[in-house]
Image (cartoon, grey):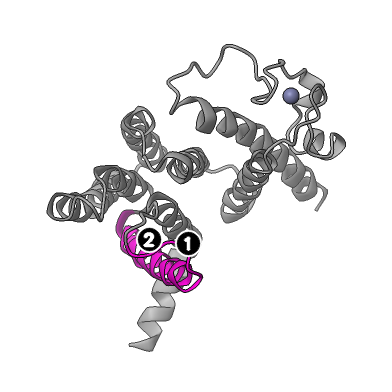
Amino acid sequence: MFYKVYFTVIVFLFGLVVGSFDNVAIYRIPEGKSLVAPRSFCPKCGKPIAWYDNIPLLSFIILRGRCRTCGEPISARYPLVELVSGLLFLAVFAKADFNWSAVLLPYLLMVTVLIIVSGIDLQKQIIPNKVIYPAIPIGLAAMGIVALARGDAGIMLRSLIGLAIGGVPLALLALALPKGMGMGDAKLAAFTGIFLGYYQLAGFFFAFLLGAIIGVGLIIAGKGGRKSRIPFGPFLAAGALIALFWGPTIWELYRSLL
Ligand SMILES: [Zn+2]
């Protein structure tokens, strides 16, 4: 019991710290800026942020969401990204029942890349190659380590099948309908397929379902007609997370209904 509580706190804090890095990546990668230098600064007044004002989640609360120097509001996106990262890290560890498991490494990589890509896609309507190109071979290598650790080559085979299930249909769709789907979406689905294997199909199902619900909702709310482009990356990410955490349960449910 104590072990679980202790582990929960450590994992959540670890997720918050990675979330803080995700914020830097979301802001700097589309601008072509370095991830390490210079230190974080306030986008409004340009003043560097001291370490004690840069503590994930906590600093935002202590500063009441305002820059210490200029008093301008800090975007709620920053604590939100940190919180989402913390909660997803917890969910990944909970999936492994708070035991050390080889799958922790690839799954933590997956949720981190999904947060960064979704954040950038929401802001800039682009899934940058700079993130997704290195992410795909690193993801394959991480699943390769799992396959080795478990002595099961089938894991690697399922990863490669998932990569194809994710990438090929959307790549064809992007070629056929360049305005509806971007090649970046295909690369992102190929990436999630590495971790999901066959469950990438469930990921697609929920991505399109959520996309349809939100799309219709936005049209009803008058916020974007048919022509306005809604970035699809966050939906692919949400679908992939549903498939990661509930894929087998959903599959069993589906089979029991047949
Ligand atoms: Zn400022």
User: Where 210 sits versus 50, above or below?
Assistant: below
Q: Residue furthest top?
A: 38
x, y (%) of residue 65? 78, 38
Mark 1–mark 2 distance (CA, rounded to whole Å): 7 Å
Residue 222 inside the magenta-drawn segment: yes
Viewport quadrant of the C terminus? bottom left
x, y (%) of residue 103? 48, 44
| Residue that badge 2 annotates | 203
Q: Residue furthest right?
A: 62
The answer to which quarter of the image holds residue 250 is bottom left
Q: Amino acid at mark 1?
A: Ile
The answer to which quarter of the image holds residue 136 is top left
Identify the magenta region: 197-226
Asked if residue 126 lies left or right of residue 35, the reply is left
Q: Residue at the location (35% across, 54% down)?
A: 229
Determine whether label 1 and label 2 are within 8 Å by CB: yes
Q: Quadrant of ligand 1?
A: top right
Asked if residue 154 lies left or right of residue 42, the reply is left
Q: Which mark is residue 242?
A: 1
Q: Amino acid at mark 2?
A: Gly
User: Where 80 sits versus 25, above or below?
Assistant: below
Residue 76 inside the magenta-drawn segment: no
Q: Residue at the location (42% across, 57% down)?
A: 235
Query: In terms of sequence position, does the residue under pointer 1 or pointer 2 come before the other?
Result: 2
The rendered magenta stretch, by its main secondary structure, is classed as: helix
x, y (%) of residue 27? 53, 30
